[in-house]
Image (cartoon, rainbow, N blue to C red):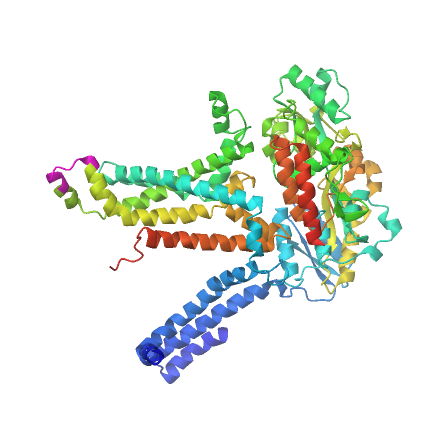
């Protein structure tokens, strides 16, 4: 067994490196690989290394196993951040998907001024997040904020929005939906345009109604695009930082703000901050794996 | 790298290498360059810029008054051939500035010799041995010329870690005109008085809010919270043993309860719990508040019609109201800290002392309204006439209390910001907030030592 596999291995090596053409190919990608190793893998591995040590900003202390991980799960700030992040991600992505799909279906039709509408829809997405966060903060504010004034006037909300964490979380979901629905719509629109028109025609000839066409044709054919779009948005919202940090003026905790506070502001929570960073990395990775294997997302166009 | 570039054409024409070899060399070269680039970034902080033995680098945020560069030029002229100071601009945001300096220290000191830094930094730097102990550079008689607050803020484990520069203190701005209309001729002396006055004036004048301050979850909220607590005699750390947290005391509860009563008693708007200096300033300058707790800087804005709907003669400044232990102002301000790794300690000290001299402090007071740290300047007629807020601030400055001097202040501040904010909002009772803080802060103090 072992000899066979060794021979097989040697054969593989020979095939890969014996051929000068292939060898050159490896030489060619080597610099890129080295750079990726240096700037992408090294920091990740280093974070993981630090997260299992009693490290501070200045020095790496003794190995302490999973103590930092146990620490973050008893840390109320981290748990609060986890809760906010999960609620934010699930709700905002759900809304973005439904509304984005609606928009995509609407602008997929041919109508006069379609190009203009498509461009206009993208405007909120074109804002840098910090800027839209600062802008919305002003609108939610109690002195000059239009939303706060209207909400108070109509009587929906009696307290200042920026002082209440639940309202802040709802507000940030709204802002995120406002901001990134266009992105979702754009991705879905691209998917819709790859569905050939003759499929619909055939369905219509067979007597399928609108609902049947949507659920039997559009959705199944759009599934690969939907998975990609939803995964993109999920991972993006899962890392939310700037929106929370700026709009709530640091009141609302997310996983990323916890990491930032731990490694940049605090002197003592450096190790926990690292553990939380690794936690985000691993959970995001698992999430992506779930999309690929659990939901059957295609990662390449080859069959 | 330039060498390689120069050589390349020669190799190409001279030896006639084939395309693949050329690409190989090019690729390797690029990889090498990238590696070098990365290494260069890492070491960039340490690259020396100062040449002569007396050339030092002074790091400080941008100075909009322009007075800083003028004084540096003056110092360089007076010490020509001996010392020379270069001003390196740091980020405006205090947190980012701190971060930058800390990163330099962590990577082995860097090339900054003198830092113009916030009053809350020294313990955090000193505990790591990053800044110089200057106890023997400032004699007792010299030290006694400075205000007590700034000196206390730089005293860590009995040693002095900086030279005072300029200071800041929380004070009470009030609408003189509105108070008079309601029959009050003086600023409130106690918190209770402030509350009853605010309610009456709001009723009489129809002003939107009584008292605005900084209740948001951030450093400013910590300062305000500590002012309430300290004015009732509550303390964060045991004065005789800084490793012991004593925040959970009946006095602290009284102070925090006073702060928490502001909203339910209708004195402060509910939104005050998300106010920073910016929002409280807007409310006050728009004429929407009777009282405002803020730093001295706001006084200059009152007189500026672009910023303010109210005029200087409508406003006056007083020390913050007193609790059962008197009036207490949170201490702000900036001092000089000297990089312990600097090879030019003498030059650094000379510069810091020069800047702290009465003449230079007076210049900055007149050109930029920076509050001096020297007691004598509060009797200087020229300053008092030209910068009224300094005259008004004198009393508040006498009652300043620094924030806890601890190597883990950043961590303590994060916890206090959170619990104070919750108590201001009424989400937790003052008792519970302080109990939580007692445990959390003690844990931080234990970890830090």
Image point (51%, 67%), residue name: B37
Image point (52%, 70%), residue name: B36
Outermost front residue? A1
Along the line of sight, the residue nearer the viewer: B273 or B424: B424
From the top left corner, tell me how far across and down residue B275 is, in percent.
Answer: 60, 33
- Judge whether residue A204 is colored magenta: yes
The image quarter containing residue B76 is: bottom right
* In this view, A155 is above or below B58: above
Outermost right residue? B141
For the question of whether residue B90 can be seen, the reply is no
Image point (71%, 16%), residue name: B181
Horizontal side of B196 relative to B308 (left or right) equals right
* In this view, B130 is above or below B445: below
Image point (44%, 71%), residue name: B30
Q: Which residues are magenta?
A: A203-211
* In this view, B131 is above or below B148: below
The image quarter containing residue B366 is: top right
* In this view, A16 is above or below A83: below
Along the line of sight, the residue nearer the viewer: A213 or A295: A295
From the top left corner, tell me how far across and down residue B309 is, in percent.
Answer: 62, 26
Outermost left residue? A205
């Amino acid at each position: 067994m072992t000899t066979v596999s060794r021979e097989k291995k040697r054969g593989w090596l020979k095939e890969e490196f014996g051929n000068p053409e292939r060898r050159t190919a490896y030489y060619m990608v080597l610099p890129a690989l080295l750079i990726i190793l240096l700037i992408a893998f090294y920091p990740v591995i280093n974070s993981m290394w630090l997260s299992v040590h009693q490290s501070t900003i200045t020095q790496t202390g003794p190995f302490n196993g999973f103590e930092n991980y146990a620490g973050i799960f008893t840390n109320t700030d981290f748990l609060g951040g986890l809760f906010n992040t999960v609620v934010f991600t699930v709700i905002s992505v759900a809304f973005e998907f439904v509304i984005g799909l609606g928009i995509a279906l609407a602008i997929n039709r041919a109508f006069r001024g379609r190009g203009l509408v498509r461009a206009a829809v993208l405007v909120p997405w074109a804002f840098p997040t910090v800027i839209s966060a600062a802008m919305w903060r002003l609108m939610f504010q109690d002195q000059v904020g239009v939303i706060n004034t209207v909400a108070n006037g109509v009587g929906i909300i009696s307290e200042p929005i920026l002082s209440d964490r639940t309202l802040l979380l709802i507000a940030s979901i709204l802002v995120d939906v406002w901001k990134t629905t266009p992105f979702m719509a754009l991705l879905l629109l691209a998917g819709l345009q790859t569905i050939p028109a003759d499929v619909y025609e055939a369905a219509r000839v067979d007597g399928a109604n609108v609902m049947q066409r949507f659920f039997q044709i559009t959705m199944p054919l759009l599934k690969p695009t939907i998975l990609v779009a939803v995964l993109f948005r999920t991972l993006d919202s899962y890392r939310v930082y700037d929106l929370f940090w700026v709009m709530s003026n640091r009141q609302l905790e997310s996983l990323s703000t916890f990491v930032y506070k731990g490694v940049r502001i605090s002197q003592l929570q450096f190790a926990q901050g690292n553990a939380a960073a690794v936690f985000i990395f691993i959970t995001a990775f698992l999430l992506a794996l779930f999309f690929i294997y659990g939901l059957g997302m295609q990662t390449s166009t080859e069959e | 790298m330039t060498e390689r570039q120069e050589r390349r054409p020669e190799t190409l024409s001279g030896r006639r290498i084939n395309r693949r070899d050329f690409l190989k060399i090019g690729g390797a070269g690029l990889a090498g360059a990238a590696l070098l680039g990365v290494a260069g970034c890492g070491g960039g902080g340490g690259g020396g810029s100062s040449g002569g033995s007396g050339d030092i680098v002074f790091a400080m945020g941008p100075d909009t008054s322009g007075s800083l560069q003028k004084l540096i030029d003056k110092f360089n002229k007076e010490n020509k051939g001996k010392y020379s100071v270069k001003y390196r601009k740091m980020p405006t945001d205090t947190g980012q500035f701190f971060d930058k300096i800390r990163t330099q220290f962590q990577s082995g000191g860097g090339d900054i010799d003198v830092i113009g830094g916030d009053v809350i930094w020294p313990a955090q730097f000193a505990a790591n041995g990053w800044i110089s102990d200057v106890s023997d550079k400032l004699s007792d008689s010299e030290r006694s010329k400075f205000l007590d607050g700034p000196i206390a803020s730089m005293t860590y484990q009995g040693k002095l870690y900086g030279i005072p520069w300029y200071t800041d203190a929380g004070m009470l701005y009030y609408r003189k005109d509105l108070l008079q209309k309601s029959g009050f001729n003086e600023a409130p002396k106690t918190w209770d008085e402030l509350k009853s006055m605010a309610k009456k004036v709001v009723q009489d004048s129809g002003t939107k809010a009584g008292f605005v301050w900084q209740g948001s979850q951030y450093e400013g909220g910590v300062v305000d919270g500590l002012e309430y607590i300290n004015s009732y005699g509550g303390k964060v750390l045991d004065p005789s043993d800084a490793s012991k947290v004593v925040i959970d005391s009946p006095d602290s509860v009284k102070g925090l309860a006073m702060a928490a009563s502001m909203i339910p008693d209708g004195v402060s708007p509910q939104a005050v719990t998300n106010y920073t200096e910016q929002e409280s300033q807007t409310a006050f300058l728009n004429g929407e508040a009777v009282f405002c707790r803020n730093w001295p800087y706001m006084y200059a804005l009152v007189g500026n019609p672009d910023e303010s709907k109210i005029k200087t003669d409508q406003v006056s400044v007083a020390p913050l109201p007193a609790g059962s232990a008197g009036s207490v102002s949170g201490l702000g301000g900036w001092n000089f800290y000297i990089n312990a790794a600097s090879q030019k300690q003498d030059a650094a000290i000379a510069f810091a002392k020069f800047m702290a001299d009465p003449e230079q402090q007076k210049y900055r007071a007149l050109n930029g309204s920076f509050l001096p740290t020297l007691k004598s300047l509060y009797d200087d007629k020229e300053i008092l006439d030209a910068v009224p807020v300094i005259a008004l601030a004198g009393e508040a400055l006498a009652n300043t209390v620094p924030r806890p001097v601890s190597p883990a202040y950043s961590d303590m501040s994060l916890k206090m910001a959170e619990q104070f904010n919750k108590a201001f909002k009424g989400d937790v009772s003052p008792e519970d907030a302080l109990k939580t803080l007692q445990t959390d802060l003690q844990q931080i103090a234990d970890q830090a030592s």
